[in-house]
Image (cartoon, rainbow, N blue to C red):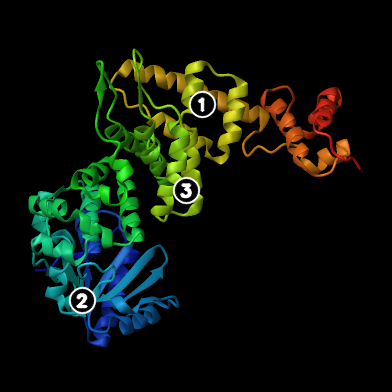
């Protein structure tokens, strides 16, 4: 059987040309060579894909050198233990691997790699929809190998393993995470046999490195509807293996007729909401963890109901630890923690009435994250009461407009005092020390309260007009003057 690769890839001529060049190189090297996995699946589904996965029966590393030379590429990343090479080319990643089988021992994080043939390689892949291959040699161009019914399973929209699922997941436990990822990305159901195996073997995920787990989680978070994957991770038991704090969000408790919302399902909805606004992974992670501290801060107050006082501050601290566990970049951890810590502020302003002072302080505290913070807050309304949602968004629109007005007037984004520490020391003739910070804070507070415009000339005039305030501060904190 053949498939028409030229037609399937007509919208991506670069990818098509690369496959043809690789096929020609394989013919010269007298090697069997196939496009495999995601590139075949996504071509059949007409989905975008930036990866070109190629499998050769033979020396993949030597062949990768030949391909790179043919494409005039100098950069090759070699993974000799896995008989794999990665070649970055423009917007694409070309991976060339030998036909192989990877097997994990009972408790090892490192698989053993054995060389094999096309049929065995395909049988050892994770799911039938990823176990299809297309010959790309000129004389065999388009010859299609679908030994395990991948096309049929795509039609059924089901994720099924080529072999016994317990064997498949034992060989590489990360495949359980991949099942959830593909279910989320493709919106396919997981075959009942595979699902039973995942629930049975979830604890085996612990032998997988956190970096690999994080990569799969990030791909789930970037899918069109991340809640599918989030819920599957919890229900399968996989979430418990690396994020037990998130699993703890689930459940509803009732006291004296007062029941709180299920924070887990609320959070899943918030992640879906924010995904409609932004593809920024930082915002999606902030949505996922914005209420992470609700379980430890949950209290019941008689006659009032459930409260979660301080969950935003504790949540930011908790995510610092969680983010490091997930091996996220430090810069992203800081951004996400800030968004968690501030996520109630815009909502509070909306409900209490907007003042310029509150807006200025929020903008200064949020800095570059102000737009993302507003997006997170818009996403955090999951009520089924349409009138309540309408009122909330109207109030929030006013907050967003006020922020824009204040920004245009006061230029507070990335706020820094127009009079720095050196200028303060010169103005008052005092040496470095804690007093400088107190004087600077007094000036900044005056700007944020709207008592003085945010520019150096106005601030210096304001200082001259309020010397008594500064003299009193200096008197209360005596220092040796110059």
Q: Which residue is mark 2?
A: 100
When the figure is inspected, residue 212 is found, relative to residue 186, above or below; the finding is: below
When the figure is inspected, residue 233 is found, relative to residue 273, above or below; the finding is: below
* Disc 3, SS: helix
Q: Is residue 180 left or right of residue 454?
A: left
Query: Number of callouts in the render?
Result: 3
Question: Given contact means CB atoms under 8 Å apart, are the residues at marks 3 and 2 in contact?
Answer: no
When the figure is inspected, residue 449 is found, relative to residue 17, above or below; the finding is: above
- The residue at 30%/32% (across/down) is 263
Q: Earlier in the sequence, mark 3 or mark 2?
A: 2
When the figure is inspected, residue 100 is found, relative to residue 325, above or below; the finding is: below
Q: CA distance from mark 3 to mark 1?
A: 25 Å
* Disc 2, SS: strand
Q: Which quadrant of the structure image shows residue 279?
A: top left
- The residue at 17%/79% (across/down) is 116
Q: Is residue 43 visible?
A: no
Tag in front: 3 or 2: 3
Give the quarter of the figure containing the C terminus.
Answer: top right
Camera-nearest residue between 139 and 463: 463
- The residue at 29%/78% (across/down) is 83
Q: Which residue is mark 1?
A: 400
| Mark carried by residue 245 | none
Q: Is residue 20 visible?
A: yes
Report crowding for label 3: few under 14, some 14 to 19, many 20 or more residues within 10 A (C-alpha): many
Q: Which residue is mark 3?
A: 333
The image shows residue 62 at horizontal and vertical percentages of: 32, 85
Give the quarter of the figure containing the N terminus.
Answer: bottom left
- The residue at 74%/30% (across/down) is 443
Q: Earlier in the sequence, mark 3 or mark 1?
A: 3
Camera-nearest residue between 315 and 29: 315
């Amino acid at each position: 059987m053949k498939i028409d690769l030229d037609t399937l890839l007509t919208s991506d001529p670069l990818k098509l040309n690369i496959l043809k060049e690789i096929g020609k190189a394989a013919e010269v090297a007298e090697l069997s060579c196939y496009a495999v996995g995601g590139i075949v699946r996504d071509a059949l589904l007409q989905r975008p894909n930036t990866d070109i996965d190629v499998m050769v029966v033979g020396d993949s590393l030597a062949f990768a050198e030949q391909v790179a030379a043919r494409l005039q590429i100098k950069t090759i990343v070699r993974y000799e233990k896995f008989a794999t090479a990665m070649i970055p080319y423009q917007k694409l990643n070309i991976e060339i691997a030998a036909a192989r089988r990877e097997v994990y021992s009972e408790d090892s994080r490192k698989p053993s790699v054995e060389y094999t043939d096309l049929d065995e390689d395909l049988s050892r892949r994770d799911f039938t929809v990823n176990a299809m291959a297309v010959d790309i040699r000129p004389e065999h161009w388009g010859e299609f190998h679908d030994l395990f019914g991948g096309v049929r399973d795509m039609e059924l929209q089901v994720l099924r393993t080529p072999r016994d699922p317990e064997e498949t997941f034992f060989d590489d436990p990360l495949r359980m995470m991949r099942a959830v990822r593909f279910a989320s990305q493709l919106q396919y159901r997981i075959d009942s046999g595979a699902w039973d195996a995942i629930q049975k073997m979830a604890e085996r995920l612990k032998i997988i490195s956190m970096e690999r787990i994080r990569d799969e989680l990030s791909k789930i978070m970037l899918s069109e509807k991340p809640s599918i994957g989030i819920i599957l991770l919890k229900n399968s038991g996989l979430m418990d293996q690396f994020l037990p704090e998130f699993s703890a969000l689930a459940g509803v408790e009732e006291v004296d007729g007062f029941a709180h919302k299920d924070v887990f399902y609320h959070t899943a909805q918030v992640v879906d909401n924010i995904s409609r606004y932004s593809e920024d992974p930082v915002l999606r992670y902030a949505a996922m963890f914005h209420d992470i501290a609700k379980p430890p801060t949950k209290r019941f107050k008689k006659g009032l109901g459930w409260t979660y006082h301080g969950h935003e501050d504790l949540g930011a601290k908790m995510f610092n630890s969680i983010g490091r566990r997930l091996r996220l970049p430090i810069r992203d951890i800081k951004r996400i923690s800030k968004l968690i810590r501030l996520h109630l502020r815009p909502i509070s302003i909306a409900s209490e009435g907007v003042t310029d002072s509150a807006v200025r302080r929020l903008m200064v505290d949020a800095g570059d994250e102000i737009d993302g913070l507003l997006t997170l807050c818009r996403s955090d309304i999951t009520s089924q009461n349409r009138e309540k949602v309408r009122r909330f968004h109207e109030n929030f629109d006013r907050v967003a407009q006020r922020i824009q007005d204040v920004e245009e007037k006061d230029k507070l984004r990335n706020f820094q005092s127009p009079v720095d520490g050196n200028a303060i020391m010169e103005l008052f003739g005092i040496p470095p020390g804690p007093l400088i910070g107190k004087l600077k804070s007094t000036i900044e507070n005056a700007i944020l309260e709207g008592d003085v415009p945010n520019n150096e000339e106005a601030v210096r005039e304001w200082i001259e007009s309020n010397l008594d305030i500064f003299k009193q501060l200096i008197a209360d904190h005596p220092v040796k003057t110059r």
